[in-house]
Amino acid sequence: VPEINEHFLFHGTKPERVEAIIAGGLDFRMSGQGMFGRGIYLAENSTKADQYTDWIWQRGKEEGRNDTKTMFLVRVTLGRLFVGPDDGTARDFTRPPCTTHGCARFDCNHVERFDSVIGGTSKHKMFREYVIYDRFQAYPEYVITYSRIH
């Protein structure tokens, strides 16, 4: 069905969150404040998802440590995509904007909303990423474990 816009996308996560995702799925309430607010971030490129598998301050200090990383291949329904701005103005999103005016305000009373947000579409971004705000749009179908080659 074209309206659901189903895809397989990657989701990288920290080691301490893997078991919770396996047990209960992805949950936007566990996410931090990202470029497009608090949501579940997914990528079509595994290199982008890999950026979320550890803390940036740990990189380069992995020698002698277990450097096994984990990401998920997620079956996700994106539905109608809103092209998010790459200028930081979407940091307060907690749900996709309305289809009428693109409102993202908490007090927006418009009923029709986009289903997800796509970011990284500007020429200055290397990777696109997708954000959903409803956990029932995503099913982590495969667990991928790997080690980075240094």
Image (cartoon, rainbow, N blue to C red):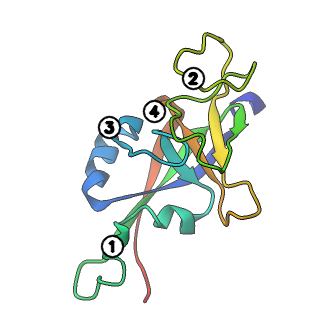
Secondary element type, mark 2: loop
Residue plotted at (70% across, 36% down): 82
> Tag on residue 105?
2
> Tag on residue 97?
none
> Tag on residue 57?
1
- Mark 1 neighbour class, 10 Å CA radius: few under 14, some 14 to 19, many 20 or more: few
- Nearest the camera: 130 or 101? 101
Residue plotted at (34% across, 66% down): 55
- Nearest the camera: 40 or 25? 40
Measure how far apart labels 3 and 4 are at the Cα level. Answer: 10 Å
The residue under label 3 is 24
Measure how far apart labels 1 and 2 are at the Cα level. Answer: 34 Å
Give the mark nearer the N terminus: 2 vs 3. 3
Frontmost of labels 2 and 3 is 2
Secondary element type, mark 4: helix
Measure how far apart labels 4 and 1 are at the Cα level. Answer: 29 Å
Give the mark nearer the N terminus: 3 vs 1. 3
> Tag on residue 135?
4
Q: Position of residue 11 (x, y in %)?
A: 48, 54
Q: Position of residue 85 (x, y in %)?
A: 68, 45
Q: Amino acid at mark 1?
A: Trp
> On the rendered structure, is 8 left or right of 101?
left
Measure how far apart labels 2 and 3 are at the Cα level. Answer: 29 Å
- Mark 2 neighbour class, 10 Å CA radius: few under 14, some 14 to 19, many 20 or more: some
Q: Amino acid at mark 2?
A: Arg
